[in-house]
Amino acid sequence: MYILGIESSCDDTSVSLIDATDEGFVIIAEKTASQIDIHKKYGGVIPEVAARAHAEYILPLIEEVLQGKKPDAIAVTSGPGLMTALIVGVEAGRTLSYLWNIPLVGVNHIEGHIHSVEASPEARIEFPGLALIVSGGHTELIYIPKQGVYQKIGKTLDDASGECFDKVAKLLKLEYPGGPKISKMAVEGNPKIIAFPRPMMKEDNFDFSFSGLKTSVLYWLRDNPEFQESSVSMNDFCASFEQAIVDVLVHKTIKAVESYHPKTVILGGGVSANKKLRETLQTQLMGISEKTPLLVPEIRYAMDNATMIAIAGYYKAKKQEFTSWNTLKADPQWELGES
Ligand code: KG4
Ligand code: ZN
């Protein structure tokens, strides 16, 4: 069966078509229209502007991906995300479901990021699984005892890790989104030059906090206004900051692996594109459990995309977890694990 995936929860309009059987699926076509060029002049995503761009892009993308094929089901992100952005995808999905008289699946965006790792044909999640999802809006540790069952065991109490990257990048006057720019400079830097704090690292839980780190960066920049002319380079600064985030994320994930003994560890979300994070988590996981694989998405599937939504929709369709076109609603606060 053909499953059409639609994603519009933030600043990427994305459409994908997968061909699914009981045994698995193949990706037929996918297209994403990024809005980064539109939002970077504002230094972040403007919800109303994002909605207008989604409305402009979505139908041409669907037409381009389908190439005349008629899908058998539609999977659309219905939360969490920006309300104005989500409703564009949800309304497109509802309308097509009604017109073509085909079933509709509402997918949680975080569930999509979890399944993004399966866009690589050889990668399959084994249960129980443990996922660290790190993006511009989320930083969560999720225990997955079996397919479709999610227990959030930790989350950020304030800023998301990607948000922290983006806010610090803004302080450095780098363009939105700042995460990739900071991590690029960090490659050439020495992470030991500035000792930024590792918030909540030693606390006996799986929660995170990044707003204090952002404030420390702000104070450090205020106290060292000329740092680029001093012995501390921009690369050292970025490496030190990146290391602080990576240390906290990896420490808590490893602690969760030791407590929950998953068969697969999943790293997903936009920040999972970060090389230092991938490598550090892989090395430390090998150190405690050689046989537990770390699944990470290909870089293009780390970012928001509709293929991960189609894959998550595939598992729901297999269990006949459909929603009717007349009841599906965008839910900007939808917590994974709650229906
Ligand atoms: O998952 P995503 O595409 O959108 C959301 O659902 O938020 O994640 C975007 C986030 C941004 O905050 C961006 O700065 C961050 O992912 N990001 C990175 C890297 N690439 C993207 N952060 C750190 N290092 C990277 N290489
Ligand atoms: Zn995302």
Image (cartoon, grey):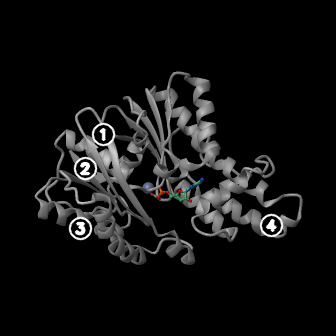
Q: Are marks 3 and 2 in contact (CB under 8 Å)?
A: no
Cα–Cα span, label 3 and label 2: 17 Å
Q: Which residue is mark 2?
A: 3
Whichever of labels 1 and 2 marks the residue nearer the N terminus, that label is: 2
Q: Are marks 3 and 1 in contact (CB under 8 Å)?
A: no
Cα–Cα span, label 3 and label 4: 50 Å
Q: Are marks 1 and 2 in contact (CB under 8 Å)?
A: yes
Q: Which residue is mark 1?
A: 25
Whichever of labels 3 and 2 marks the residue nearer the N terminus, that label is: 2
Q: Are marks 4 and 1 in contact (CB under 8 Å)?
A: no
Cα–Cα span, label 4 and label 2: 54 Å
Q: Which residue is mark 3?
A: 91
Whichever of labels 3 and 1 marks the residue nearer the N terminus, that label is: 1
Q: Position of residue 142 (x, y in %)?
A: 42, 41
Q: Is residue 105 left or right of residue 240?
A: left
Is 13 above or below relative to 123? below
Cα–Cα span, label 3 and label 1: 26 Å
Q: Position of residue 95 (x, y in %)?
A: 18, 66
Cα–Cα span, label 4 and label 1: 54 Å
Q: Residue at x 77, y 56 (%)?
A: 235
Q: Is residue 94 left or right of residue 246?
A: left
Cα–Cα span, label 1 and label 2: 10 Å
- Between circles 4 and 1, the one closer to the viewer is 1
Q: Which residue is mark 4?
A: 223
Q: Residue at x 76, y 50 (%)?
A: 195
Q: Secondary structure at mark 4?
A: helix
Whichever of labels 4 and 2 marks the residue nearer the N terminus, that label is: 2
- Quick check: which quadrant has ligand 2? bottom left
Q: Residue at x 48, y 54 (%)?
A: 303
Q: Secondary structure at mark 1?
A: strand
